[in-house]
Structure formats: C-alpha cells, structure tokens
Image (cartoon, grey):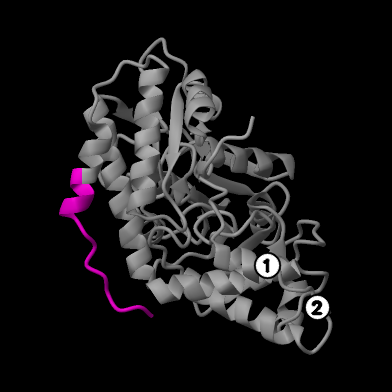
Amino acid sequence: MRQAGRHFLQIPGPSAVPDRILKAIGQQTIDHRGPDFAEVGLKALDGMKTIFKTKQHVFIFPSSGTGAWEAALVNTVSPGDKVLMFETGHFATLWNKMARKIGIDPELLEGDWRGGAEPDRIEARLREDTGHEIKAVCVVHNETSTGSVSPIAEVRKAIDAAGHPALLMVDSISGLASIDFRFDEWGVDVCVSGSQKGLMLPPGLSFNAVSEKALQHAKSNTMPRSYWDWHDMVGPNKSGYFPYTPGTNLLYGLNEAIDMLHEEGLDNVFARHARHGAATRAAVRTWELEVLCARQGQESGVLTAVLMPAGHSADAFRATTLEHYDISLGNGLSKVADKVFRIGHLGDFNDLMLMATLSGVEMGLTKAGVPHQAGGAQAAMEYLKETTNERVAAE
C-alpha cells in the first residue's frame, strides 16, 4: 500500500538528490566527442579542483568509489609492494582487502572502530621501516561505517616526522563536500571520492585527486592497468574530454552540484554538517544511547552511528521505523552488524529535515520497544535554536 508523503532517505549515502541536480541530469545527452562537450568537461574537471582544494590533477571515472580505490592503488603501487593501512572501520577493511586481491602486500594497523586513524602509531611504524619498503599510507578520512573522522593533516605530519617517503592516500568518499578537506594544504598525494555523498548526485562518478609526486610514481609503476590509467586521462582532460565514454548526464549534475556548493559557500556547508552532527549527538545522549565514535573531536558531521542497548536488534528497529514512519536508516556493517544503526545527516539537508529525521528515530525507538529516555528530538531542537549558523559570504 502506498504511503503518503515523502520517504526519508537518512542512510549515510547515497544522499537525496536535489531537484536542481535532477533537472540538470535530465538534459538531453550530447556528443561526448563534439565541440559543445568540452565546456561541460572542463567545468567539471576545474570545478572539482575547487572542491578538493587543489591546483593539481583531478581525474573523473564513470564508476563507484570502489573503482576510484582501485585506480589509486594500481597507479601508484607495484605488485608485492607494501602499504600501511589503518583499521578505522568497515571501509578501511575493504580497501585493505582490495589491496591484497590485486597483489599488494597491505599491513593493517588494528583499530577499535571508535575513532579515526592514530598518527602516533603510524609514525612509530614508519620509523621501524628503515628500508622504506612501505610505499603508501592509506587512511579513510570519514569512516562511513562508524561516524569517525581521521586527522589527515596530523597523519601527514607523522609521515614527515618519520622522514619517510611514503605517499599519503586518503579515502574521502563520504567526507568530501561535507566536512573540511584540503588536498594541497594537508600534503595529500591521492584522494579518492564519489558522487553520491556530499556532492548530492546519484552513484556513478568517482574521483582521484592526484599530486605531481603521485603522478610521477605512476610513470614507473609496474602494476597492470588499463581503464584506470591516469596517464590515459591527462591528454584528453586538458581540452575537457575523456579517453572513453564519460557519464555525460552525471557530469551535467556534477556541474550543478559544484555551483550549489559554492553558492552556499564551502565553509557554510562544513559548518552546517558539523552543527547537525552535534544536534544529533545531543539527541542520542538524551535518549541515553551511546554514539559509536568515542573520541571527542573526531565525531562526524556526515552521520552518527548509534549503539543499540544489549539484547536489542538494530536491524529490527530499522525495519520498524521503515514500516511505520517511512524512514530509511543505515545498517551496521561487519563487526557492528545488527549492533548499530546510522543516521545520515549529509548533503542537501536543513534543520527541519533533521528534526523530522530525529522525530522518526525517537518514535521508532518507542514503537520497537528499545529502552531509552524520551526527549532526544527536543534536545536537538534546543541545540539548533541556540546555535543558528553565522554564515560567511558565499564564494
């Protein structure tokens, strides 16, 4: 039976697509080899540099973020090479698994899934690597499975303090365009991202931002690659084209998304996400539930992962909220499967949408019989009333 009203898609991505972007995507497809396409391609390529905050290379692939993970690895690391990864959660673990599948030798520093990567442990391991066998350090910026943020600038400082030449490779699939990220300033060598999170598009585009150092590594790297080869991109990209058929209509949407982000101002976008994350955590504390991210200052503005009380199923709770209140919440993944639910508060999202989301969660907790204290949504509302954003000028 049809339910009246809108569905609340409050998973931590894909995020809801704004009407402006849907309208842009719905334009007629044009010849991707023709003269009119160059303007579309150049605007997307140059625009994404402003989102990554880089003057270096950005490559756009028609793929999911998983494809961009692979592109980052196969262009920079040769078969049998060592890379150092940090276990921040499910997606860091999957990136590690991919590295092993394609013939790389990854070392995963064990984490507790309660916070971001730990720069001191990374530095200590690199200092042990006196032969410089480790070719790259791979870190997830915003771990979508846990709601924890890694201090990327501090990881760069740790690599430098160890005097180690390893590349710094970052997954910001769910962080980019939602929380602060500075490719050039933070000394990142490769950043991986995707279209379906803070960029507010459907899935289907992925990105590699690439430093000149990483691009030089790709020239001598012996890993077999074809579709993902950065050097096949460089020439065509200079004039706005691609070496194969691009996602033309998604690029229309991407250009609209970039315009929207700058119309709001990136600093305002980041402040909005941080404020919504803080309001959500205020609700969780009032419910007397526990936020999965336990390290103060590393909590995400993109999503909040909430631990269920012992003996209660997160998946059963999510099913109840979907059935009764037409809201989709994120599930727990691998180690925290059925123990955690995730509230997405990212993308084209405002205070009233957050209040509706938290009201749905609170009603769902009651309906599902999950032990909690009432008043979480009210606590979030009070926080929002007290912390109206001081907006800076748009870019």
Residue in the image at 65% along x and 42% along y: 105
**Against 27, is 349 above or below?**
above
Three-letter amino acid code of the residue under disc 2: Ile
Q: In the rendering, at what x and y percent does residue 253 appear?
A: 63, 68
Residue drawn where x is 65% and y is 54% of the image? 203
Q: Check residue 390 for magenta coloring.
A: yes
Q: Secondary structure at mark 1?
A: helix
What residue lies at 41% left-to-right and 67% top-to-bottom? 182
Residue labelled with disc 1: 25
Q: Quadrant of residue 107?
A: top right
Location of the N terminus by quadrant is top right
Q: Could you tell me if the residues under marks 2 and 1 are in contact, i.e. CB atoms within 8 Å? A: no
Q: Residue furthest left?
A: 386
Q: Position of residue 104 (x, y in %)?
A: 68, 45
Instruction: Give amino acid for label 1.
Output: Ile
User: Can you see residue 243?
Assistant: yes
x and y percentages locating residue 61 in the rendered image? 71, 64
**Is 73 in front, or is 272?**
272
In depth, the one of 238 and 231 nearer the eye is: 238
Q: Secondary structure at mark 2?
A: loop
First to last magenta residue range: 382-395
User: Which callout, 2 or 1, points at the residue further toward the start of the chain?
Assistant: 1
Give the spatial CA distance, label 2 vs label 1: 12 Å
Q: Is residue 82 left or right of residue 26?
A: left
Residue at 25% in and 33% down: 376
- Which of the two residues, 355 or 298, is positioned nearer the viewer here? 355
Can residue 115 be seen?
no
Vertical placement of 210 versus 128: above or below?
A: below
Q: Give x and y (percent) for residue 194.
A: 59, 57
Give me the disc on residue 30.
2
Secondary structure mostly seen in magenta is loop
